Amino acid sequence: MRQPDFRTPVIGADSVSHEARLLSLWETSPGLKGFLATVDHKQIGIRYIVTAFIFLAIGGLEALVMRMQLAGPNLSLLTPEQYNQLFSTHGMTMIFLYASPILSGFANYLWPLLLGSRDMAFPRLNALGYWIYLASGLFLYAGFLTGNGPNDGWFNYVPYASRDFNPGLNEDFYALGMVFLGISTTVGAANFVVTAFRTRAPGMSVNRLPILVWGTLTASIANLIVVPAVSLAFFLLWMDRQFGTHFFDPAGGGQPLLWQHLFWIFGHPWVYAIVLPAMGMVSDGLPVFCRRPLVGYSLVALSTVATMILGFGVWVHHMFATGLPALGLAFFSGASIVITLPSAVAVFAWLATIWLGKPVITTAFLFFSSMILLFVIGGVSGFMTASVPVDWQLTDTYFVVAHLHYVLIGINVFPVVGATYFWFPKMTGRKLDERLGRWNFWTMFLGFNIAFLPMHLTGLLGMPRRVYTYNDYGGWQALNLITSIGSLVLAIGVLLFFINVIRSLRLGAPAGKNPWDAPTLEWSVSSPPPPYNFAVIPTVASRHPLWEGRLGTDGGLSSLDRGMLLDSGKETIGTSALDAEPDMVLEMPGDSFAPLALAVGLAVTFVGLLLRTWPAAGAGGVIVALAILAWLWPRRELREREPAHG
Amino acid sequence: MTASPLGYLGHAAGVRAQAILPLTWFTLSVSIVVCLIIGAMLWAAVRRGPRNNAGGDVASVAVERGPNGTRWISVGLAVSAVPLAITLIWTMITLAAIAGPPSNPDLVLDITARQWWWEVQYDSPQPSEQFTTANEIHIPVGARVLVRLHASDVIHSFWVPALSGKTDAIPGQTNATWIQAGAAGRYLGQCSEYCGYQHAHMAFEVVAEPQAEFDRWRASQLASAAAPSTDSQSRGQALVEYRCGLCHRVRGTDAGAVMAPDLTHVMSRRTLAAGTLLNNPGNLAGWIENPQALKPGNQMPNQFLSAKQLSDTLAYLETLK
Amino acid sequence: MAEIAVSQPQNLPVGPVGRYGIGWWGVATLVASEAALFSYLLFAYYYTGATTQQGWLLEPSPALKLALPNTLLLLLSSLAAWWGERGVLQRRRPQALAGFGLAFLMGCGFVAVQCLEWHSKTYGIGVSSYASLYFVTTGFHIVHVLVGLLVLLAIFGWTALDYFSPRRHLVVSAGVLYWHFVDVVWLFVFTTYYLTPYLGFGR
């Protein structure tokens, strides 16, 4: 029987039978099948978060071992090769396997809840993104654990990365692993972009989007454009290494600097992609603890986009010492100085929000507010390196190491930990322990600053980066020892965080729907939310639906209790891009094994390529093709097909 | 505690470094002031928190729209723009002043960075005035020295902080940089682009000296190796030609390979192995015997010489001043 | 008392209608990403050519006798795919099958001619950076063509199974979009490798 092509959605209020119906439509199957085939964005989000935190811990352990080697001059705990693999793997792990996936995890979990929707636009693609992330992470670590970890730094310059100088499998693991991981980043980005534009609650116009959505959306659009650059660079490197091509080697007419251009065209936007969503977390969370809306919402949203756009035009500041013509350097130096301005907008907005609000000190607040200072410290050290002549002294010293840790830990890790304290109650129905949280905060804050603040001086005293040992030149020994001690304290702080999370899963104080009396839509549903998120599709009338009565909005009030029921199938509402007018009922897919199968097929392909066993690579390709075919096979229940004639 | 020889904040001895130093101090001062101001503002803003805390019960503190507050952003941006603009202009001026190599250099060097040492060629219009040395660069005080950088294997970076900023040495291209020392002294340099196992031990020294001393040094470097005068030295020379000559060169002997540092005047240098060891008899012996222990992964294999062979080799090498 | 605004849309389409569906946008974002990929490949060509020595081009005047007709063949195949999509839109299954089938065959022809072209080159992939760039860029393109051929085959098969109607054919639109993309990419690759030498680049 033909299903109706048009429908006027039934408007109503929630009821027990309605919820039961939705549950049966949306719940993941129990047991192993559900575990392997789920497309529930909340489950996928939690997987991303847990996996990313595990990689954070591993990367942190790598750093601790390095800091023991560097605690004194001329120590020999590690051989040069061991140290080189450690610092390279540490960078790769933190930047690729932690910093972006953790934000994907939070965004995956939160976006539909923030947007008033029941799922992301592409639930199966969402699942695929996670499986590929897991598989590529294991692939990359298989290299490290077999003594074949990358050893040329996370940015992997040629010619050292080429076969002549690096004949082992190290670089092949890294190159192919990165191409593999890039698929996850790309499909995740596509999902965020389409979700942001097409699946919001009615009334959630662009000027009502939470800043986390602005940040993740901006990062996702950027990733779609720049991830291919790095994937291509790694692929061409693999070709040079395995098939004797000459993209990068000068002897054959290749260009070592081509690698740097391709890498940094990706790399610079990437570092904005791993902080802008986290800044969004602060922009959304901090105001809750200041009991007022964010100051300058529109400016913050626009500055997010402006920072990313400018971020496409500064990549050469990683290459100031490579001998490029001074005119080119001047342009990129200017752009790198100017980009400070849009990034400063958020800092002033946050400061004003605290000052003009009524701050309530909680652990989440401490992390969100302290990151402002860390942001500024990281920002000013970046400003210093933006000036070409100054950078000619600072680059490749520990000054840059200090800078990058302030921006990455300050603008990614601290907001993420704060976000965990903020949203853990929503995800689990329990609060994290506040007393342990204070210990967690202060150890992390003090440990981090003890480790990395003196590091600026270490760099100004000339200590170069990426050295497995050093002589006791004036001050280096004392400073390095202080940094190593600080890193231990920081590690203890992170450990306290993990302990708090694990303990609180069982022993945390129960949290209701809205323990922080926060304003956005996710706090209107139970903690944890039901699989379908919203029993009734909300209609949004402002940025702060749950605060409207108290803030005195001019327009109408949001409707949370009455709205579209959408329970004829597994359905959510599709809306227009700018004003979020409903324009389509979307039928969503249920559990599916296709994403896992596709990820397995890709893994087989990449392992085959790594080991140069072409039949295996081919078999993997066949699995991939079949999985895609099964996935895209038009389905009636998704309204993807109907016969032409009745 | 001696000052760090690679520091560039406290002092600058070269023309380019001297031009960079005040800009570095300006940006550093601005940075510190900004951090202090923002830190103070943050502290003041947060300090009002405990009044509201109510035991951390967020819901009990009433929500209020509060003042608009966007003035904070506009004022903040306006104030930030001032040091940014100053830095921008000062940067362009400094860049214009120090970027280009001199069109009329007093001295031209071709330096080839290799894993993990520096080959230094002194150029001259007269072929008989050209010579090659390694790791220790002498220049006259005040001379404008053009340095053409080459790399034979991977990317390295030439950096002598007291004199100038960094310039990379990239295989397949020649990057020109320049140094000019304002005062006499020994200035430590360091490779500043990760280049493999022993990137940590790839230093070099620039010795700036008065013109007369430089001329004396150059003349002695141009001379071929001294002839051996004792039997031990003769045996040593033969060993050097036969064994070391596979990679090293000693002008005036049959040791003529160019894959490793030129040893013709190795004893005139203050350090060995690209700044890794002080050049004294003990270290030299230790280096020849077991270079892998002192600089693991470097290109020189262990030599497995007998005690007598080692002492003969040392006896000869000691003559190469 | 401020009003509670409840959104009460009337008569909404259920599922994708024509090419208005989120699936189409999904393919469009992936196409954008792939377009970026080819941009970087072409960037590599122009960057290497501009910074290398003279005589970089192995063929200062690349032979067009295979490439130009092949380009036209690919363009015609896009036309055939478009015509096939119109067949779906107008409920004319024979036209749809003919269009997709022709596009598939022409695409196969393109691949065959490309292989012939590769075979006729006097240089191999490892000869120089120019050779590497040529083979890898055209190789990436051919891989995308092969994927496109599988897509056309799937669309052909599903059309034969009577899966589509003027309202429900999102997969067809998305697939044909992909095929057009492959075509447009080729125009850029062709211009870069076969036409810019005549304008003096890389000589």
Image: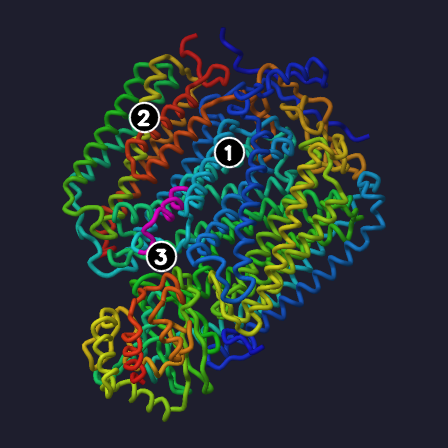
In magenta, the rendered stretch is A165-177
The residues tagged by marks 2 and 3 sit, at their Cα atoms, a distance apart of: 39 Å
The residues tagged by marks 2 and 1 sit, at their Cα atoms, a distance apart of: 26 Å
Q: In this orientation, which residue lies closer to the viewer: B229 or A105?
A: B229
**Can you give x and y, in whole percent of width and height, for residue A88 in the image?**
46, 52
Q: Is residue B310 left or right of residue A101?
A: left
Find numbered disc 2 in the image and state the secondary structure of the residue it sits on.
helix
On the same chain, marks 1 and 3? The answer is yes
Q: In this orientation, which residue lies closer to the viewer: A354 or B265?
A: B265
Find numbered disc 3 in the image and state the secondary structure of the residue it sits on.
loop
Main SS of the magenta part reads: helix
Q: What amino acid is found at the position of numbered circle 3 in the picture?
A: Tyr
Q: What amino acid is found at the position of numbered circle 1 in the picture?
A: Tyr
Question: What chain letter is assigned to the residue under label 1?
Answer: A
**Can you give x and y, in whole percent of width and height, for residue B12 in the image?**
51, 79
Question: What chain letter is assigned to the residue under label 3?
Answer: A
Q: Which residue is mark 1?
A: A130
Can the viewer see residue C191?
Answer: yes
**Can you give x and y, in whole percent of width and height, for residue A214 in the image?**
59, 42
Q: Which residue is mark 2?
A: C150
